[in-house]
Image (cartoon, rainbow, N blue to C red):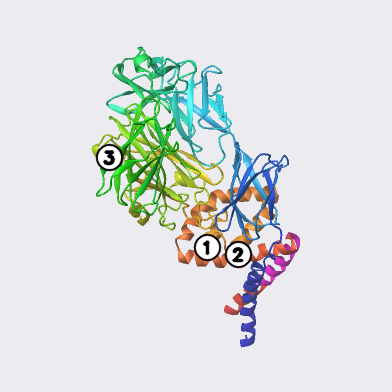
Amino acid sequence: MSFNRKKTLFLRVGILFLFSLIFAVNQVSADTSYVISGSVKDIASDKGIQGVTVTIHDENGANAGSVSTDNSGTFSLTVSSSGDYTITNVAKIGYELESPPMIVSPGTPVNIYMSYLVNPITLKDALTGALITNPPNQMLVTLQDSSPTLSGYINANGQVQLNIPSVFGTYIFNIVDVSSNYVSSTVTLTQTNLTANLQPKAGIINGTVQDTTGAALNMADVAAFQPAMPTTHYMAQTDGTGSYTIGIPVGAAQTGYTVAANKDGYISGKITNVNIGAAANFTGVNGLGKLTKIVNVVPSLPGNGTVVVSVDASPTFTGTVGELTVAKLFGVTGTPTVQAFTTATRTIVYNAVEDFTLQITAITSGNSSTVVYDYKANVTVTGGTANPVNEAGGTTTLRNNSQSVVAQIPAGGIDTNGVVAIQQITKSNTKATTTKGSPNYLYDIKVTDVTGNSLTTTGNLKKIIITLPFDLTIINPGDFEAGNSVIYHASTLSALEAGNASAVPVSQIIKTNYVGDGSVGSVQFWVTSLSIFGIGGGGSSPVTGGAGGGGGGGGCFIATAAFGSYFNPFVKVLRDFRDTFLMANGSGRAFVKWYYRASPPIANFIATSKFAKGSVRIMLLPVVGFSALALQIGMFWSNLLMFIVIGTFIITVRKLYAYAK
């Protein structure tokens, strides 16, 4: 064979790859419309789904808005400019998302598919393992914090059907046995583990909870526990008359219980040495007194060499003499002074800019509240709160800058009187991997005694339950459960952002909320030591886009892993082909659904191997080329043209083989 014929054969092979590249990079011209629109459909019936919340972010990660689908399942959202946008969240209770988060452009409608989700929750006897098949309307299961309330009774098969939120997460269910055969329980379940084991009831402790005026307290939390095992509780909640009944399981101790009652806005109380069958009444002198709550403590620097600490209380300050006092626990040169009353927000002036600790006492309800406030000169604090707690437990909540953090001491969580303090701290390093899943702020959470000594150090802290916010553009559904996103904590802000932090084990996660408000979700967990908390998030998903999950983002897991970015133009071609052709028919949707489940492990391997990345890129080029061609001229003509190209390729390979032979 002549030299020219050899050149011609190899040139043909090169042309095939060039053909793929040309069509892969041939993208549609820029959109001129600034409206993002589309439809959300049921994957089985292909009918639109009404009331689905669709949240969209721009390419810089800023929230462009949320919109709900109409009665035909369609939505539209006007945005400020052209360019790529990310659909970061699609949620409706009772449905599971089949189309992953995707990149969209104004003027190009998209189709999003969801499947109806029914999750049976199974109840079993913890001792025998047998199904609990109580008579109808006897065993009520309710998803905690659901809105609207999701609840139902178990059927003859020991199951209850609840359409729990359709993103992978960890949920808390309250289970109440009206027949009184089993101990009413609060259990944590996930979509992959929906079996709850209930303990048969051996006896009860009951009673009434009132305030100091004799008024019944509704929805007060009551817990019974053994002092030697303070983190094992048997719980109940009061009804409208203030009455409660706590079930004690078979095999538990018969005597010596501590019963604790607490309600937000009241001083928690406890009664000791209670036996099964006895009543523990929080009435009269044992009633719960109103609590002065310090709801916000915020420092500011006026620039005159002082630190001004603003304090708000509930009930509010009125100007009464002695309602706010302060003492310095730590500081070098400064002295704190309470300023004269002018507004409901009282101020304390510390006449030096340095690290200091103050003991603040407020009284606006007849009962004083003493907390400890810690100021660090090199940390930007944007909000804070503190509340006293005792062995009966208590809850402290900070709501600031559209974020909420909750620190709950359960009954027996500490074995002395203490103070829970929460401070909201601005990130100083927005690129730190250990905090990238926290939306703008980190949280310093402490439990001390009234003199500022840490109860973690003294060993008095047994358990605290914390709820932190996280960024939904960074954290994807299931990331915490899979270990792709981690809750970190460290003793200082600099240590946390430098990566010198400890991780909270996945086993200590109680509840996750991947829906939230469309921008911020939440994760609840328990710990026995405290410090500054942040969330490292996103797994292998790109921080800039915040989309995808599993192996690489947006469902095109293998392509994203190979090309290194969710925003790579070749990956976008494959996404567009999926949305335009595969999701338009039943067989295509079935293939996509299988691909989402099968491809993440492969993508994870590709992402860690340079050789695998290069090899897969080469193999994907013809696929990208065909996809781009189909998007331009349609499937029929693309198939015809590709038939001709493949035929030419086969003939060429045969000639090469013959030449080599």
**Type of amino acid under label 3:** Ser
Task: Indicate the secondary structure of the residue bearing disc 1.
Answer: helix
Q: Is residue 649 magenta?
A: yes
Say which residue appears at 59% left-offset and 31% top-offset.
Answer: 148
Q: Foreground mark, 3 or 1?
A: 3
Residue linked to disc 1: 562
Between 157 and 355, the one nearer to me in the picture: 355
Q: Is residue 456 left or right of residue 342?
A: left
- Figure quadrant of residue 108: bottom right
Does any portion of residue 2 appear in the rendered image? no
**Type of amino acid under label 2:** Pro
**Type of amino acid under label 1:** Ala
Residue linked to disc 2: 569
Quarter occupied by the N terminus: bottom right
Q: Is residue 63 magenta?
A: no
Residue linked to disc 3: 454
**Real-space Cα distance between discs 1 and 2?**
13 Å
Between 295 and 187, the one nearer to me in the picture: 295
Upstream in the sequence, badge 3 or badge 1?
Answer: 3
> What segment is highlighted magenta in the picture?
635-650
Between 568 and 392, the one nearer to me in the picture: 392
Label 1–label 2 contact, CB within 8 A = no
**Real-space Cα distance between discs 3 and 1?**
49 Å
Upstream in the sequence, badge 1 or badge 2?
Answer: 1
* Dominant secondary-structure state across the stretch colored magenta: helix
Q: Foreground mark, 1 or 2?
A: 2
Residue 81 position, x and y percent, is: 65, 59
Does any portion of residue 61 appear in the rendered image? yes
Q: Is residue 614 left or right of residue 307?
A: right
